[in-house]
Image: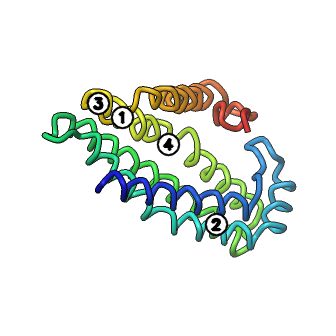
Amino acid sequence: MASRQAGVAGLSATVLAAAAIAVVGTAPDASVGTAELQTYAAAHKNGIVVSFALFQLAIPFLFVFFAGLAKTVAGANGEASALALGGFAGGVGLQVVVLAGAIPFVAAVWRGADESVLRATYDANLLALYALTAGFSIASVLLPAVAGFVTRTLPTWTAVPAAIVVAANIGELAGFVLYDTGPMALGVALILR
């Protein structure tokens, strides 16, 4: 039953997240100039606010998904419960940091902040979406995947998307550590989009 609830919740979160992305479109990358960022924020103010509202609606569904996944991969006797709970904590932490990074940017766009405030909050938002959540993202995928393989509750093909997510997040961390400016400052995620 938990796996079915998790599946429905995951699908609901995916639909809401896709709608949030569709409403606002593609945001500028980290290397965009301040004037272009100001123009983008003014032109997409309503879309950014609506997108953020849709993201907030997705969060409870994500928590149900993470909880159901943790219950499923923990095993019938809880033999992998520590890994499963670690994955749950990674998923919750990921959403909390993303939300904390987005709030100042959305407030700056909503109120029409000056260029320096808009730049700082946009950078914080991008960092929260990418490099600063890479560890949480890795935990939210890797730990449940390992638990699922230990308990044999996940099919083996799930190792492929899990490995892709882990590799992408390691790239984000490497980009953040090695580069101060340019699109690589936030890792490979911005390059691949």
SS under mark 4: helix
Position of 66 with respect to 176 (left or right) is: left
Q: Please identify, in this view, whether the residue under mark 1 or under mark 4 is nearer the observer.
A: 1
Reading the image, the residue beneath label 1 is: 154
Give yes or no for contact between labels 3 and 1 (Cβ–Cβ under 8 Å): yes
**Which of marks 3 and 2 precedes in the sequence?**
2
Q: Earlier in the sequence, mark 4 or mark 2?
A: 2
Q: Which mark is residue 54?
A: none
The answer for how far apart the CA atoms under marks 3 and 1 are is 6 Å
Q: Which residue is mark 3?
A: 152
* Coordinates of residue 149 in the picture (x, y in percent): 32, 28
Q: Quickly name the residue at label 2.
A: 106
Percent position of residue 114, x then y: 75, 66
Task: Say which residue appears at 47% left-offset and 28% top-offset.
Answer: 157
Mark 4 vs mark 3: in front: 3
Q: Which residue is mark 4?
A: 133
Tell me the residue at 51%/56% (across/down).
Answer: 11
Q: Residue 97, image x and y in percent?
A: 47, 52
